[in-house]
């Protein structure tokens, strides 16, 4: 028996299958059109089902944030994986070896000499050679060596290590999430591409071939991915989009595949209370701040509402004129940040139109190691 999503209990994570597939195809078509490979970041959705859809529609592999995510995906049969996080802890290195033992085509992030020496020492006890990608800093000022000569020095050091090989150079322009308009967004995108290309060309001038030159921020990938010399893009959030992407002008609300279904639990003078607090919507307005993001999510069909504050279980939405909502009415909320909200749920309730058609597990939720 088919079920209408309006009949579901709340809070529930709804995933519009049609919009999801459209977003997946948009990424794939961009990659084909610009002759670059697609390696989407799965930390947004953490779902085996969605990762396999991305691979079916042209992705050559996936990107993960953490080793646990890689282990979940590998257990489901996905074998081409980049771990976009520098790993140096001995216990984690043993888990890297475990993935290699399983035949996973694993790539691991490196950005300092001490780290690569630790990887080399552990791998000397095995039969494996590990492919490593050098991360360069393109303005986010988080992880990564500085572009150019510092990247060359690290690549040269890796050449002297018998169990490591340089497979690529990559970066993440996460600071683009704080762009104040299209011009600033484009500057971030071109700087992203330049950091990778500059580093790769410097390495090749020193006799070190760099086969993969990868960029990957949802706000920038359709700009940096068109720059000559870039070979791969790694968008993550583009599979769903969210209110932050809408605020950046990267997406429209109609392109947001993920919504949270909420119920009205109280109606008062000038405010309604929803059963979606910080444990559901998260206290997220973007890591870098964005003036165009108002409140803690956009209430679909009710632009007069602003979710002004959250406690753990309550979302307080204010309005100036009558919002027309009554006790037990249901609304859908486009989250500010889809990645963190998806991580709060066990499953996606997949819908087509108003009908529930499937339920997909958020397989790698809560994976933090």
Image (spheres, helix red, strand yellow):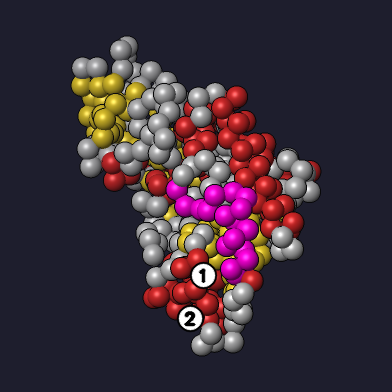
Q: Nearer the viewer, residue 119 or 281?
A: 119
Front tag of 2 and 1: 1
Q: Is residue 233 above or below residue 336?
A: below
265 vs 7, left or right, is left
Image quadrant where residue 39 sits: bottom right
Residue drawn at x 40%, y 62% is: 367
According to the image, label 1 marks what residue? Answer: 116
Q: Is residue 299 above or below residue 213?
A: above
Residue 205 % position (x, y): 74, 56
Residue 365 % position (x, y): 41, 58
Q: Nearer the viewer, residue 294 or 348?
A: 294
Q: Quadrant of the C terminus?
A: bottom left
Q: Is residue 227 magenta?
A: no
Q: Residue 122, labelled with which disc?
A: 2
Residue 314 % position (x, y): 24, 37
Q: Is residue 18 visible?
A: no
Dot 1 falls on a residue whose secondary structure is helix
Q: Is residue 343 visible?
A: yes
Image quadrant where residue 127 sits: bottom right
110 vs 214, left or right, is left
Residue drawn at x 65%, y 60% is: 168
Instruction: Compare marks 2 and 1 and give the one earlier in the sequence.
Output: 1
Q: Is residue 146 magenta?
A: yes
Give the magenta range.
142-158
320 vs 288, left or right, is left
Local crowd size for mark 1, using a 10 Å CA cut-off: few (<14), some (14–19), many (≥20): many
Residue drawn at x 57%, y 55% is: 150
View extreme (top): residue:
321
Q: Nearer the viewer, residue 292 or 170?
A: 170
Dot 2 falls on a residue whose secondary structure is helix
Contact, CB < 8 Å: mark 2 with mark 1?
Answer: no
């Amino acid at each position: 028996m088919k079920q209408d999503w309006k009949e579901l209990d709340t809070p529930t994570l709804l995933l519009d299958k049609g919009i999801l597939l459209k977003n997946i195809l948009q990424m794939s078509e961009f990659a084909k059109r610009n002759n670059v490979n697609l390696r989407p970041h799965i930390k947004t959705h953490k779902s085996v089902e969605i990762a396999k859809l991305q691979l079916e529609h042209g992705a050559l592999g996936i990107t993960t944030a953490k080793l646990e995510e890689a282990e979940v995906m590998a257990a489901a049969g996905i074998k081409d994986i980049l771990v976009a996080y520098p790993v140096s802890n001995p216990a984690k290195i043993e888990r890297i070896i475990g993935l290699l033992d399983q035949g996973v085509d694993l790539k691991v992030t490196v950005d300092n000499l001490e780290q690569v020496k630790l990887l080399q020492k552990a791998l000397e006890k095995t039969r494996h050679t590990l492919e490593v990608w050098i991360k360069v800093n393109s303005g986010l000022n988080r992880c990564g060596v500085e572009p150019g000569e510092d990247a060359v020095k690290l690549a040269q050091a890796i050449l002297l290590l018998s169990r490591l090989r340089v497979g690529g150079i990559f970066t993440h322009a996460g600071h683009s999430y704080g762009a104040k308009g299209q011009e600033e967004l484009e500057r971030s995108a071109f700087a992203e591409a330049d950091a990778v290309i500059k580093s790769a060309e410097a390495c090749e001038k020193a006799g070190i071939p760099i086969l993969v030159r990868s960029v990957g921020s949802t706000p920038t990938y359709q700009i940096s991915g068109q720059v000559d010399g870039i070979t791969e893009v790694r968008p993550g959030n583009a599979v769903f989009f969210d209110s932050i992407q809408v605020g950046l002008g990267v997406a429209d609300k109609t392109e947001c595949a993920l919504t949270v279904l909420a119920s009205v639990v109280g109606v008062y003078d000038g405010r309604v209370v929803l059963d979606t607090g910080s444990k559901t919507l998260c206290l997220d307005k973007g890591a870098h701040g964005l003036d165009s993001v108002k409140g803690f999510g956009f209430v679909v069909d009710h632009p007069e509402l602003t979710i002004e504050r959250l406690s753990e279980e309550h979302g307080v939405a204010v309005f100036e004129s009558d919002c027309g909502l009554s006790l037990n009415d249901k609304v859908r909320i486009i989250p500010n940040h889809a990645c963190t909200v998806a991580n709060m749920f066990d499953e996606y309730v997949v819908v087509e139109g108003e009908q529930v058609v499937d339920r997909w597990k958020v397989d790698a939720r809560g994976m933090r190691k």
